[in-house]
Image: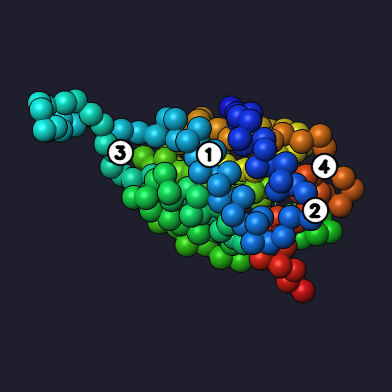
Amino acid sequence: MHVHVADHPLISHKLTLLRDESTDSPTFRRLADELVTLLAYEATREVRVEAVDVKTPVAMARGVRLSDPRPLVVPILRAGLGMLEGMQRLLPTAEVGFLGMVRNEETFDPVTYAERLPDDLTGRQCYVLDPMLATGGSLAAAIHFLVKRGADHITAVTLLAAPEGVERIEAELADLDIPVTLVTAGLDEKLNELGYIVPGLGDAGDRLYGVVG
Ligand code: PRP
Ligand code: URA
Protein backbone atom coordinates (compact mmCIF):
# COMPACT_ATOMS: atom_id res chain seq x y z
CA MET A 1 0.00 0.00 0.00
CA HIS A 2 1.27 3.42 -0.84
CA VAL A 3 0.94 5.71 2.21
CA HIS A 4 0.77 9.45 1.69
CA VAL A 5 0.81 11.66 4.80
CA ALA A 6 -0.40 15.07 3.70
CA ASP A 7 1.80 17.41 5.70
CA HIS A 8 0.57 20.73 4.32
CA PRO A 9 0.63 23.41 7.06
CA LEU A 10 -3.11 24.14 6.67
CA ILE A 11 -3.88 20.45 7.11
CA SER A 12 -1.68 20.26 10.23
CA HIS A 13 -3.31 23.42 11.61
CA LYS A 14 -6.83 22.07 11.18
CA LEU A 15 -5.85 18.63 12.48
CA THR A 16 -4.44 20.22 15.64
CA LEU A 17 -7.76 21.98 16.28
CA LEU A 18 -9.60 18.74 15.59
CA ARG A 19 -7.52 16.85 18.16
CA ASP A 20 -8.21 19.43 20.88
CA GLU A 21 -10.59 17.89 23.42
CA SER A 22 -12.25 21.28 23.92
CA THR A 23 -13.35 21.49 20.25
CA ASP A 24 -17.14 21.16 20.22
CA SER A 25 -19.16 18.98 17.82
CA PRO A 26 -20.23 21.69 15.34
CA THR A 27 -16.61 22.89 15.04
CA PHE A 28 -15.36 19.31 14.81
CA ARG A 29 -17.75 18.61 11.92
CA ARG A 30 -16.71 21.75 10.10
CA LEU A 31 -12.99 21.02 10.52
CA ALA A 32 -13.41 17.41 9.39
CA ASP A 33 -15.27 18.64 6.33
CA GLU A 34 -12.56 21.20 5.48
CA LEU A 35 -9.78 18.67 6.04
CA VAL A 36 -11.36 16.15 3.71
CA THR A 37 -11.58 18.68 0.90
CA LEU A 38 -7.86 19.37 1.29
CA LEU A 39 -7.10 15.63 1.44
CA ALA A 40 -9.35 14.98 -1.56
CA TYR A 41 -7.07 17.11 -3.68
CA GLU A 42 -4.19 14.71 -2.90
CA ALA A 43 -6.35 11.60 -3.00
CA THR A 44 -7.64 12.29 -6.52
CA ARG A 45 -4.22 12.83 -8.05
CA GLU A 46 -4.68 9.63 -10.10
CA VAL A 47 -8.37 9.96 -10.88
CA ARG A 48 -8.98 8.72 -14.41
CA VAL A 49 -9.68 11.33 -17.06
CA GLU A 50 -10.08 11.31 -20.81
CA ALA A 51 -9.11 13.93 -23.36
CA VAL A 52 -11.79 16.30 -24.68
CA ASP A 53 -11.80 19.37 -26.87
CA VAL A 54 -13.46 22.54 -25.63
CA LYS A 55 -14.30 25.69 -27.52
CA THR A 56 -13.18 28.79 -25.63
CA PRO A 57 -14.36 32.28 -26.73
CA VAL A 58 -11.03 32.49 -28.58
CA ALA A 59 -10.11 29.06 -29.96
CA MET A 60 -10.36 25.32 -29.46
CA ALA A 61 -8.44 23.94 -26.47
CA ARG A 62 -7.48 20.44 -25.37
CA GLY A 63 -8.76 19.50 -21.95
CA VAL A 64 -9.87 16.50 -19.91
CA ARG A 65 -13.01 15.25 -18.20
CA LEU A 66 -13.57 12.48 -15.67
CA SER A 67 -13.76 9.09 -17.38
CA ASP A 68 -16.68 6.69 -17.23
CA PRO A 69 -17.40 4.76 -15.12
CA ARG A 70 -17.45 7.55 -12.56
CA PRO A 71 -15.50 7.10 -9.34
CA LEU A 72 -17.34 5.58 -6.40
CA VAL A 73 -17.06 7.21 -2.97
CA VAL A 74 -17.75 4.92 -0.01
CA PRO A 75 -18.06 6.43 3.47
CA ILE A 76 -17.90 3.89 6.29
CA LEU A 77 -20.79 4.70 8.62
CA ARG A 78 -21.06 6.25 11.01
CA ALA A 79 -17.98 8.46 11.25
CA GLY A 80 -17.16 8.32 7.53
CA LEU A 81 -20.39 10.18 6.83
CA GLY A 82 -18.73 13.27 8.30
CA MET A 83 -16.29 13.14 5.38
CA LEU A 84 -18.74 12.72 2.51
CA GLU A 85 -19.63 16.32 1.72
CA GLY A 86 -16.00 17.39 1.83
CA MET A 87 -15.18 14.73 -0.78
CA GLN A 88 -18.22 15.46 -2.94
CA ARG A 89 -17.19 19.11 -3.08
CA LEU A 90 -14.26 18.05 -5.30
CA LEU A 91 -15.94 15.07 -6.96
CA PRO A 92 -19.56 16.18 -7.34
CA THR A 93 -20.40 13.64 -10.04
CA ALA A 94 -19.02 10.62 -8.20
CA GLU A 95 -21.50 7.93 -7.19
CA VAL A 96 -21.81 7.08 -3.51
CA GLY A 97 -22.04 3.63 -1.92
CA PHE A 98 -22.38 2.97 1.79
CA LEU A 99 -20.90 0.52 4.26
CA GLY A 100 -22.07 0.48 7.88
CA MET A 101 -19.52 -1.01 10.25
CA VAL A 102 -19.04 -0.90 13.96
CA ARG A 103 -16.05 -2.21 15.83
CA ASN A 104 -16.63 -4.69 18.64
CA GLU A 105 -14.92 -2.77 21.44
CA GLU A 106 -13.67 -5.98 23.13
CA THR A 107 -12.33 -7.97 20.18
CA PHE A 108 -11.85 -4.95 17.85
CA ASP A 109 -13.40 -7.04 15.06
CA PRO A 110 -15.53 -5.03 12.62
CA VAL A 111 -19.23 -5.94 12.38
CA THR A 112 -20.90 -4.99 9.10
CA TYR A 113 -24.52 -3.88 9.68
CA ALA A 114 -25.27 -2.19 6.36
CA GLU A 115 -24.05 -2.48 2.80
CA ARG A 116 -25.31 -0.55 -0.20
CA LEU A 117 -22.81 -0.87 -3.01
CA PRO A 118 -23.22 -1.46 -6.74
CA ASP A 119 -23.02 -5.22 -7.48
CA ASP A 120 -20.50 -4.69 -10.23
CA LEU A 121 -17.50 -2.46 -9.61
CA THR A 122 -15.49 -3.67 -12.58
CA GLY A 123 -13.12 -0.95 -13.69
CA ARG A 124 -14.20 1.44 -10.91
CA GLN A 125 -11.91 3.67 -8.92
CA CYS A 126 -13.13 3.71 -5.32
CA TYR A 127 -12.50 6.21 -2.54
CA VAL A 128 -13.13 4.86 0.96
CA LEU A 129 -13.74 7.45 3.66
CA ASP A 130 -13.20 6.76 7.35
CA PRO A 131 -11.62 9.24 9.75
CA MET A 132 -9.79 6.61 11.82
CA LEU A 133 -7.55 3.73 10.75
CA ALA A 134 -6.85 2.11 14.13
CA THR A 135 -6.37 -1.69 14.13
CA GLY A 136 -7.20 -1.64 10.42
CA GLY A 137 -9.98 -4.24 10.72
CA SER A 138 -12.73 -1.98 9.36
CA LEU A 139 -10.75 -0.65 6.42
CA ALA A 140 -9.42 -4.10 5.49
CA ALA A 141 -12.98 -5.47 5.47
CA ALA A 142 -14.18 -2.51 3.37
CA ILE A 143 -11.41 -3.04 0.83
CA HIS A 144 -12.29 -6.73 0.56
CA PHE A 145 -15.95 -5.84 -0.16
CA LEU A 146 -14.87 -3.58 -3.01
CA VAL A 147 -12.27 -5.92 -4.49
CA LYS A 148 -14.72 -8.85 -4.48
CA ARG A 149 -17.00 -6.77 -6.72
CA GLY A 150 -14.28 -5.89 -9.16
CA ALA A 151 -12.89 -2.51 -8.04
CA ASP A 152 -9.46 -2.11 -9.56
CA HIS A 153 -8.10 1.01 -7.88
CA ILE A 154 -8.72 1.93 -4.24
CA THR A 155 -7.80 5.02 -2.28
CA ALA A 156 -8.57 5.25 1.43
CA VAL A 157 -8.86 8.72 2.93
CA THR A 158 -8.46 9.00 6.69
CA LEU A 159 -7.85 11.83 9.12
CA LEU A 160 -5.57 9.71 11.33
CA ALA A 161 -3.88 6.35 11.03
CA ALA A 162 -1.97 4.15 13.49
CA PRO A 163 1.17 2.28 12.39
CA GLU A 164 -0.36 -1.02 13.60
CA GLY A 165 -3.35 -0.52 11.30
CA VAL A 166 -1.20 0.35 8.31
CA GLU A 167 0.87 -2.81 8.89
CA ARG A 168 -2.25 -4.95 9.15
CA ILE A 169 -3.71 -3.59 5.92
CA GLU A 170 -0.41 -4.20 4.16
CA ALA A 171 -0.30 -7.79 5.42
CA GLU A 172 -3.95 -8.51 4.57
CA LEU A 173 -3.66 -7.03 1.09
CA ALA A 174 -0.33 -8.64 0.26
CA ASP A 175 -1.99 -10.97 -2.27
CA LEU A 176 -4.04 -8.28 -4.00
CA ASP A 177 -2.65 -7.08 -7.26
CA ILE A 178 -4.57 -3.81 -7.47
CA PRO A 179 -3.14 -0.47 -6.35
CA VAL A 180 -4.24 0.67 -2.88
CA THR A 181 -3.27 4.08 -1.55
CA LEU A 182 -3.81 5.61 1.87
CA VAL A 183 -4.02 9.39 2.10
CA THR A 184 -4.09 10.63 5.69
CA ALA A 185 -3.69 13.91 7.52
CA GLY A 186 -1.60 12.25 10.22
CA LEU A 187 0.23 9.03 11.04
CA ASP A 188 0.22 8.79 14.83
CA GLU A 189 2.43 7.00 17.33
CA LYS A 190 0.55 3.84 18.35
CA LEU A 191 -2.66 2.26 19.62
CA ASN A 192 -3.45 2.04 23.33
CA GLU A 193 -4.85 -1.05 25.07
CA LEU A 194 -8.40 0.11 24.25
CA GLY A 195 -7.59 0.24 20.55
CA TYR A 196 -7.58 4.04 20.44
CA ILE A 197 -5.07 5.95 18.37
CA VAL A 198 -2.47 7.77 20.51
CA PRO A 199 -2.41 10.77 20.68
CA GLY A 200 -5.36 10.62 18.25
CA LEU A 201 -8.50 12.64 18.67
CA GLY A 202 -10.70 10.27 20.68
CA ASP A 203 -13.79 8.60 19.26
CA ALA A 204 -14.44 10.24 15.91
CA GLY A 205 -18.06 9.06 15.64
CA ASP A 206 -18.90 10.34 19.11
CA ARG A 207 -17.21 13.67 18.49
CA LEU A 208 -19.09 14.11 15.20
CA TYR A 209 -22.50 12.83 16.22
CA GLY A 210 -22.59 12.25 19.99
CA VAL A 211 -22.43 9.11 22.10
CA VAL A 212 -24.76 6.25 21.17
CA GLY A 213 -25.53 3.93 24.08
C1 PRP B 1 -14.44 3.75 14.24
C2 PRP B 1 -13.84 4.41 13.01
C3 PRP B 1 -13.50 3.24 12.14
C4 PRP B 1 -13.11 2.19 13.15
C5 PRP B 1 -11.62 2.13 13.18
O1 PRP B 1 -15.75 3.41 14.02
O2 PRP B 1 -14.71 5.33 12.41
O3 PRP B 1 -14.59 2.80 11.34
O4 PRP B 1 -13.61 2.61 14.42
O5 PRP B 1 -11.19 1.09 13.95
P1 PRP B 1 -10.36 -0.15 13.38
O6 PRP B 1 -9.33 0.39 12.46
O7 PRP B 1 -9.81 -0.74 14.63
O8 PRP B 1 -11.34 -1.07 12.69
P2 PRP B 1 -16.69 2.86 15.19
O9 PRP B 1 -16.62 1.37 15.26
O10 PRP B 1 -16.38 3.59 16.47
O11 PRP B 1 -18.14 3.20 14.68
P3 PRP B 1 -18.84 4.63 14.44
O12 PRP B 1 -18.21 5.21 13.20
O13 PRP B 1 -20.27 4.26 14.25
O14 PRP B 1 -18.63 5.50 15.64
N1 URA C 1 -12.05 4.68 16.46
C1 URA C 1 -12.04 5.99 16.82
O1 URA C 1 -13.06 6.68 16.62
N2 URA C 1 -10.95 6.47 17.42
C2 URA C 1 -9.86 5.75 17.65
O2 URA C 1 -8.87 6.27 18.18
C3 URA C 1 -9.87 4.39 17.26
C4 URA C 1 -10.98 3.87 16.65
Taking the spot 82% from the left edge, 37% from the top edge, the residue there is 190
Residue under numbered circle 1:
38
Q: In the drawing, does residue 79 fall left or right of residue 94? A: right
Q: In the drawing, does residue 180 fall left or right of residue 196? A: left
Q: Are marks 3 and 4 in contact (CB under 8 Å)?
A: no
Whichever of callouts 1 and 4 sits on the residue coming sooner in the sequence is 1
Which numbered tag is attached to residue 66?
3
- Real-space Cα separation, disc 3 to disc 4, in angstroms: 38 Å
Residue under numbered circle 2:
21
Residue 191 occupies which quadrant of the picture? top right
Res. 143 in view: no
Whichever of callouts 3 and 4 sits on the residue coming sooner in the sequence is 3
Q: Of tags 3 and 2, which is closer to the observer?
A: 2
Q: In the drawing, does residue 111 fall left or right of residue 213? A: left
Residue under numbered circle 4:
199
- How far across and down, in percent of the image, does residue 11 sit? 62, 36
Residue 176 occupies which quadrant of the picture? top right
Splitting the image into four quadrants, where does ligand 1 fall?
A: bottom right
